Image (tube, rainbow, N blue to C red):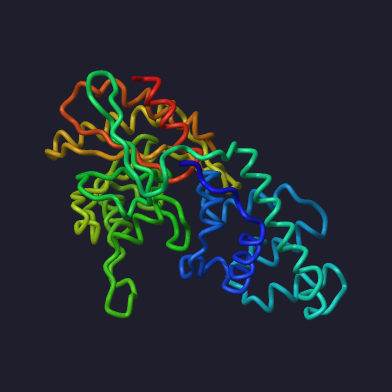
């Protein structure tokens, strides 16, 4: 069943909510239209907005960036301060800006999001969000999950893609790393984090191996406990350092050799620890900058040699683009 087309009015309304709340409170709100658009593009919501704003110019680009806290140093500004700064660009009062330019910015951003997503070929995948498909490949089968990773159950090992500093994504992000961090954290009755399990254990590993404040070789894999994900049947989280930050830029590089090395290390570690079922992401899709098809090709070239081994292989993706690439690749491999 194909996904419904994106609705610009629904997007504009959710953008209005996000403008008031701010990106730091992104996870506190249900934003199905924005989430669908971001999933279709294979990007977190904040990265989707960044990419759209990068395609704008002049006052419109600057005002949009201020409105949503995308301008450098403004992410934690209150909504009224962001509005005030955007209004200055047009030489109007914040109230006048709210009634005129801000409405145009919201509507324009909604349409620009749809244009961007359409450029990714948003046509539906035949695998709705929240579903799983077992696909025969080379005498065995690979299980493809299209779902949020925190809903994955019955898989012993979840592999997370990390940067070579082994620093997990911030909790307000919507990346795989951020989602695993949130899902594994121990919280008190008020919902506050009392043990940020995965980053704590990664920092301990870095200290123990003399790498604190430094980097590891791309392809390094570090195991941690699953924290609260144990309730889903997860026994381990393997953190694969596959993305290399570019100096002076908010972008990353992913090389095929790093993915091959990471996959080899994952299987070696799983064999050593007696783990059988392993779920892999599309390394490098999203913040890594790889197109979904390229990310799947990198992963599949690394996974294929292990198809005959005694492992139950799973692949997880949430986006329309990533699901389509994985389905096409697995079906052609069959």
Q: Quadrant of residue 266?
A: top left
Residue 61 to residue 240: above or below: below
Looking at the picture, tell me which residue is in the foreground, 279 or 88.
Answer: 279
Looking at the picture, tell me which residue is in the foreground, 203 or 207.
Answer: 203
Q: Position of residue 42 (x, y in %)?
A: 51, 44
Q: How many marks?
A: 0
Residue at screen point 29% across, 37% down: 314
Q: Quadrant of residue 159?
A: top left
Q: Quadrant of the C terminus?
A: top left
Residue at screen point 51% across, 70% down: 25
Residue 264 to residue 204: above or below: above
Looking at the picture, tell me which residue is in the foreground, 218 or 116.
Answer: 116
Left or right: 71 with respect to 39?
Answer: right
Q: Position of residue 17 (x, y in %)?
A: 59, 70
Residue at screen point 33% across, 75% down: 191
Furthest residue in direction left, as rendered: 274
Q: Position of residue 163 (x, y in %)?
A: 43, 45
Left or right: 85 with respect to 288?
Answer: right
Q: Position of residue 277 (x, y in %)?
A: 20, 38
Furthest residue in direction right, as rendered: 91
Looking at the picture, tell me which residue is in the foreground, 258 or 33.
Answer: 33
Residue at screen point 37% across, 48% down: 147
């Amino acid at each position: 069943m194909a996904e419904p087309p994106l609705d610009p009015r629904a997007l504009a309304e959710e953008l209005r909510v996000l403008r008031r709340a701010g990106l730091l409170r992104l996870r506190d709100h249900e934003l199905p239209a924005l989430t669908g658009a971001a999933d279709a593009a294979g990007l977190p919501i904040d990265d989707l907005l960044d990419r759209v704003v990068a395609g704008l110019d002049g006052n419109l680009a600057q005002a949009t960036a201020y409105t949503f806290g995308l301008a450098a140093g403004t992410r934690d500004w209150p909504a009224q301060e962001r509005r005030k700064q955007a209004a200055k660009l047009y030489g109007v009062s914040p109230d006048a800006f709210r009634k005129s330019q801000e409405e145009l910015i919201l509507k324009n951003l909604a349409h620009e999001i749809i244009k961007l997503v359409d450029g990714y070929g948003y046509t539906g995948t035949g695998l709705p969000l929240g579903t799983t498909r077992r696909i025969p490949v080379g005498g065995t089968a690979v299980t493809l999950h299209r779902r949020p990773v925190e809903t994955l159950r019955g898989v012993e090992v979840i592999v997370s893609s990390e940067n070579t500093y082994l620093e997990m994504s911030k909790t307000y992000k919507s990346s795989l790393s951020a989602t695993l961090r949130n899902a594994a954290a121990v919280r008190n009755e008020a919902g506050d984090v009392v043990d940020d399990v995965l980053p704590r254990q990664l920092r301990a590993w870095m200290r123990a191996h003399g790498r604190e404040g430094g980097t590891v070789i791309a392809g390094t894999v570090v195991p941690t406990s699953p924290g609260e994900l144990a309730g889903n049947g997860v026994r381990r989280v393997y953190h694969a350092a596959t993305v290399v930050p570019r100096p002076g830029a908010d972008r990353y590089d992913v090389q095929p050799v790093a993915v091959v090395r990471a996959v080899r290390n994952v299987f070696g570690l799983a064999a050593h620890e007696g783990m059988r079922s392993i779920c892999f992401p599309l390394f490098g899709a999203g913040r890594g900058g790889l197109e979904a098809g390229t990310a799947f090709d990198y992963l599949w070239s690394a996974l294929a040699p292990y198809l005959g081994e005694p492992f139950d292989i799973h692949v997880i993706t949430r986006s329309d683009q990533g699901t389509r690439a994985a389905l096409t690749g697995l079906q052609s491999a069959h």
